Amino acid sequence: MPPLLPSERPPRLTLRHGIPGRRELDRYDALLLLLPTDGRPSRALPEGRHWQLLHSSAPVSHGAVRTMSFDNTRHTLGVMGHCRADAEPFEVLRVAGLMAQRAWADRPPPRRIAVIVQITGNRRGPWQEALYAALAARAFSLPSARTAGPAPKPLLAVDVYGAAALDATRAERTAEANNLVRHLVALPPNVLDATGYRRLLATLARRHGLRLRWYGEPALQRLGAGAFLAVSRGNARRDAGIAHLSYRPRRAARGGAPDVALVGKGILFDTGGTNLKPHRSMLDMHTDMAGSAVALATVVAASQLRAPLAIDAWLAISENSIGPRAYRPQEVVRAMNGTTIQVIHSDAEGRMVLADTLVLASRQKPRVLVDFATLTGACVYALTERMSGLFASTPELAAQSLAAATASGERLWQFPFPEDFDSDIDSGTADIAQCALEGKGDHILATRFLKRFVAEDIAWAHVDLSSATRRGGLAHVPTEITGFGARFALGLLLDQLERPAKRAARR
């Protein structure tokens, strides 16, 4: 069986000045050269004349990728890609992904790769990071239980030339976070069950200096978490719970409120419950815990990078199973904040487990709260799997989130969620209905539902992860399981929310 945690680390990233010489080519299995569409390969490149011949062999267009082999002892593969100089980060990642795919084509897996980005100005660093991210994603092996054949050798090193603007440590940790999300989401549900999840959380907490508290079903019963417990009631084992991980930077007040709370939906397998899903809809429901994987990978990466923010991560971990004790439509349950909920459909379980988790997270009084969840099919129908949905309670947090999404290449589209939508989830028997009878606008209705469980004085964003999986991959990630969310979340923390924290620390 595959291990709970990945054994592979991302390839070592080394920054080198200048460009490699002809003799240095023998160190590399591949050399990747990324150019703007209106640029030409420099004659100063190793085998510069061959690069120029390759460039002139056909008209250049955005996304075009060409290859050649050098006549050296290693038969180094040259991969040349073209990208519009003004391309958005998503497009840069996509082109980088195409180049990474070619680096693996028709050859043994590369062990060492050189990267050259021939563009000037402040775009060089992001383009270099995109190529590294694409190589790290392509090299990563998703968990497998196959017994035939040896495992492929991993990519060991990526050398980036002329990379003064690139933060190598952050690039490595961001790639590692994306791969951790992909690994966890790909695990079979009989491997990543609630007991296994709790075990890997303990391992990661010890490894990265995080505090871990587990709220099992008895504790949640005492806290009055009726919404969460309604969902977990149908499980065969009583191992569901809410995990609370805490990262505190050095010199932070140990008992102080967090700057940021991350909340993740961790439904380890979703049968739909009493309202049972059909086969095609149920087949891949081991991926319904992607939101929890994003929150977990983000807090781990933040601790590795020693972010100056105090961060909590709350993971709602359960299955949504069918059984004699499974919750049913028309039941009324009481959430932790006292709100009574009329159950309409047992397959709207995500908002139920998130409700009590959001209450717990709110009680710690974070400055900002962000939740991640593979919550609604309506968001997929609205956006497809190419981008995910954003809902934000304040204009400032919306702007920060959209800026982080654009810069990370993990695209978000902001939806409205005005108050009048509440009339669609009015209940005659409880404070609120779990959902509407019809599915239209369910991503908006789910957000209105969740808002009831977030304190009014907390800036809150909800990310509906319609991009957690996409057939054919997404941007630089070649697999159906994309790991979407970790790049965005780290960008939000480190480039947007970190600044107010630094200002507050200086006062």
Image (spheres, rainbow, N blue to C red):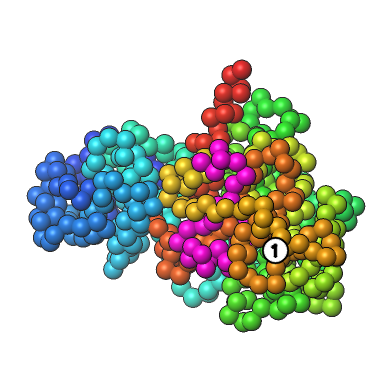
Residue at 57 percent of width and 53 percent of height: 416
Residue 398 colored in magenta in the image: yes
Determine crowd level at label 1: few under 14, some 14-19, many 20+ residues with C-alpha closer than 10 A: some
Q: In screen coordinates, is 76 left or right of 441?
A: left
Viewer-proximal residue among 461 and 268: 461
Residue closest to the far right? 222
Locate the C terminus and report the quarter of the image it occupies. top right
Viewer-proximal residue among 285 and 137: 285
Q: Taking the image as drawn, is residue 179 in sight?
A: no
Quadrant location of residue 288? bottom right
User: In x, y percent, where is residue 31?
Assistant: 26, 51
Residue at 29 percent of width and 46 percent of height: 86
User: In x, y percent, where is residue 250?
Assistant: 64, 28
Q: In screen coordinates, is 475 left or right of 6?
A: left
Q: In screen coordinates, is 189 left or right of 119?
A: right
- Look at the image and give the residue range highlighted in magenta: 372-399
Locate the N terminus and report the quarter of the image it occupies. bottom right
Vertical position of residue 398 compared to residue 382: above or below: above
User: In x, y percent, where is residue 188?
Assistant: 62, 69
Residue at 81 percent of width and 61 percent of height: 341
Residue 151 colored in magenta in the image: no
Which residue type does callout 1 highlight?
Asp
Q: Which residue is mark 1?
A: 424
User: In x, y percent, where is residue 348?
Assistant: 70, 67
Secondary structure under the numbered disc 1 in the rendered image = helix
